Structures are given as C-alpha cells and as structure tokens.
Amino acid sequence: MLILTDIYILTLGLVLGSFYNVVGLRVAGGRSIISPPSHCPSCGRRLAIRDLVPVFSYLFLRGRCRTCHQKISPIYPIVEASTGLLFLFSFLRAASVADMLCGWLLASLLMIVLVTDLTEMMIPDRILFFFLILFAVFRIFFPLVPWWDALAGAASGFIVLLLIALISRDGMGGGDVKLFAVIGLLVGLKTVLLGFFLSTFIGAAIGVAGMLTGMIKRRQPIPFVPFIVLGMLAAYFFGDRLIAIYYSFLF
C-alpha cells in the first residue's frame, strides 16, 4: 500500500511538473495558460495525449517533435522529473501534513520561476503575487512557531536582497528580491537567510569555475534562479544538519 502511495505522489508531481512548464513558458511570454492547447512551438501541431506523458514522451521521441523533428528543450523533462522527485521526497520526509504541503508549495514556486528565468531571464510579478497570497493563506492555517517568523522571513528576504541590489547596482535583479521575500513568508527567517547564503555560494563557485574554463565570460548575464533553487532546497530540507556541521567546524 505504501509503495502505491509513493507511486501516486510521484505521478502527481510529474503531472504538475508538466503543467508548471506550461505556466512558466506562457506567463513569461504574456500568453494564456488555458488556450491554445499544448502544441509544438516550431510547427504548431497540437500535441496528442501520447506526446504529453511527462518525461517518457520526451525519451520516447528522443527529444524531438513527432512531426517536424525539431529539438524539444530539455527544460521540459528536467522540470517534470524534478517536481516529481521533490514531491515524493517531501512526502517521505514530512513529519506532518503541514510539512508535506510546505515542501510541495516551495517546490512548485521554484520550478515555475526556474522555467521563466531559463527561458526569458525574468520572474513575472503575476506568479510571485499568486504565490504570495497562497503562502499567506497557508501560514494562517499552519503558522510557524513563533507566528511572527513568517513575517520576519519575508521582511529579511526583501530587505537583505534589496540592499545587495542597491549596493551592487543591478548585480541582483528586482525579481530575485521579490522572490526571496515571498519564499521567506513560507519558510521563515533562518531558512530564507541560509538559502540566500547557499544560493550565493553556489552561484559564485559555478561562476568562477565557468570563467576559469572559458564557458562564462566576464559580466555575462546568467540566470540566478537555478542557484536559488539549489540553495533554497538545501536550506529547507537539510538546513538544521548543515548548520550543525558548520558549528562543529567552528567549535
């Protein structure tokens, strides 16, 4: 029975991941998420059900459209698989329904803005506003302890990132500032600050490595959301363990 539940949760995440691709691509492009139906962006052919099976359709078609044979972006299966695995992992590690839902909400926001940032280098306000309301309602029914931790997380996420954006003179985008504020409302003060630190560390490490190898040019704009995804997920799922390891090195 437990295995069937795991399969159901994984499938739910895969299906939602497919939907998050649609939301990210269409909202970033200013289009409706309802119409037109899913279609090939190259030839315009409406996709059949067999073309819409998360991950498996991409693998079966070898990453190409069935009709025009143009390459399909690997972002689609990556987001689908990541959402499915994150949903399952949140379910397996959750100590309560609130923990599970919190993990699902965080994963949903991160996957959608990952798509918008990778494709359009932007984080739409419409998406952030929707999740701001959703997170606020969630925290009313499932408050953090203490209750003001959510407000402190939102405030710190906004203020710290805003100061960095002002000091760095566009080194940090306005969308990133608002994204951390929204995430802070969900996860609280400690987790959002740790997530910011890890995101910055990962981004700096990859950036330096990219410049040393010539893959990234100096002052070349690169999407920051992939680093935010890695940093925030590490902070949310393993934050206490990481902090304990850090203190063990200090003392």
Image (cartoon, rainbow, N blue to C red):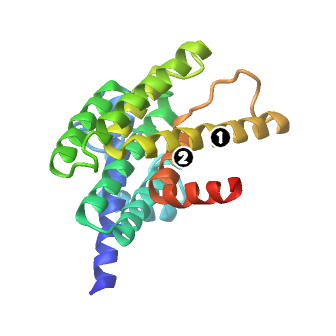
Q: Amino acid at mark 2?
A: Gly
Q: Please identify the quadrant where the N terminus is shown.
A: bottom left
Mark 2 vs 1, N-terminal side: 1
At x 36%, y 46%, the residue is 187
Q: CA distance from mark 2 to mark 1?
A: 8 Å
Q: Please identify the quadrant where the C terminus is shown.
A: bottom right
User: In terms of image quadrants, where is residue 44?
Assistant: top left
Estimate the x, y position of residue 174 in percent, counting from the top left. Answer: 45, 20
Estimate the x, y position of residue 169 in percent, counting from the top left. Answer: 59, 12
Res 201 label: 1
Q: Is residue 7 left or right of residue 98?
A: right
In the rendered structure, are the residues bearing label 2 and label 1 in contact, judged by CB atoms less than 8 Å apart? Answer: yes
SS for tag 2?
Answer: helix
For disc 2, the marked residue is 231
Is the residue 165 above or below the residue 27 in the image?
A: above
Q: Is residue 217 left or right of residue 129?
A: right
